[in-house]
Amino acid sequence: MAKTRSVPDLWMIAATLGILAIGIVMVYSASAVAAFHDYGDAFYYVKRQMIFAVLGIGAMFVTMNLDYSFWRKWALPAVLICFGLLILVLIPGIGVWRGGARSWLGIGSFGIQPSEFMKLAMILFLAKLLSERQNHITQFTRGLLPLLSILGLAFGLIMLQPDLGTGAVMIGASLLVIYVAGARLSHLGGLALLGLGGLGGLIAAAPYRLQRITAFLDPWQDPLGAGYQSIQSLYAIGPGGLVGLGLGLSRQKYNYLPEPQTDFIFSIIAEELGFIGGALLLLLFLLLIWRGMRTAITIADPFGSFLASGIVGIIAVQVIINIGVVIGLMPVTGITLPLVSYGGSSLTLLLTALGILLNLSRYSR
């Protein structure tokens, strides 16, 4: 296929670097108090975030200049390796407990989260399989069921950690790829009903999930327990007003809002930078998602189109869930804000995936 663009999408690059820059500044602002208290170094978290940002930008540069057809050959090995890592992380003594889940492989404060890499590997695998068997996707048993079986197995392994948030992002992005490939809405609608039933089963199997649901509906029923994070998040957003309290002047980061540099970093952004700062960040995400979907729509190769849709889906689903949780529209799920929240595996993976998306943009019409 002849290239129709000599350079990647510059708007996409600008949005990515803009979001990343905001993220680094806000990781420092949100974490400085806790980092100094816990480690005696206010820069503890932001230094690590910057290391992973540099590594991620390097990976993005490589994948941006690597022809996307390379990933067609490695899609199956990638998903098999990730399945192996998801099994390995469940073995006591190998997997590391953090935040109430056995989700990590690594030593000390540095590690990788296999479920994060499975999100991209699954998109690669689905894009390859659907581009080769797109004419079967309208058939439930020959087309859709095998894909759902593989997707369900990956989701099941992630839930054994347990990590409902990452699993939900993988499912959402994967279903977007399947829909773009031409799956019937009647089939997907039936699956949605089954998914609601399965979600009810997962909630019933773990009482803490039921507590999160009830806390979401009325956090004041348990203000010092299940509803604590939601209440403190709203306490951060409310005083921010139009222009915020000022960069670095958050009150909630003083041990009121737990882990403000990760899942609830948008609360600190709204508190310090106000509605204007939060809206600017969301506009950058909308620009990134729009340019990514434009690439998916205008690229002629089905594999490239499905791959672009899946990468955009990972980002969009994660943003929707994170912001929904922060402003009280969804139960707390433990989803980070892409490119903004503190986290090495997530940041490196997303920048690598965005490099692939930027390479795909070279081929858009």
Image (spheres, rainbow, N blue to C red):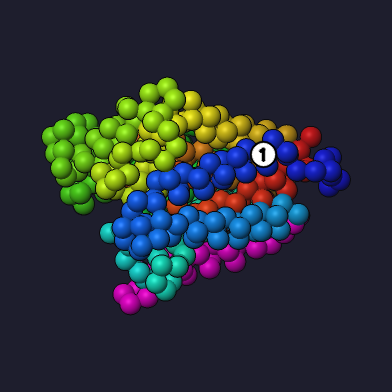
- The percent coordinates of residue 137 (x first, y second) are 57, 43
Magenta stretch contains residue 196: no
**Residue 51: quarter of image:** bottom right
Please name whichever residue, 288 or 176, is drawn nearer the observer in this view of the structure. 288
- The percent coordinates of residue 94 (x first, y second) are 37, 75
Tell me if residue 167 can be seen. Answer: no
Q: Which residue is mark 1?
A: 14
Please name whichever residue, 263 or 35, is drawn nearer the observer in this view of the structure. 35
Residue 30 against residue 242 in the figure, above or below: below
Amino acid found under the numbered disc labelled 1: Ala
Q: What range of the chain is rendered magenta?
A: 66-94
- The percent coordinates of residue 67 (x first, y second) are 76, 54
Q: Residue at x 73, y 38 (%)?
A: 10
Q: Residue at x 70, y 55 (%)?
A: 61
Q: Residue at x 31, y 75 (%)?
A: 92
Tell me: 167 left or right of 300.
Answer: left
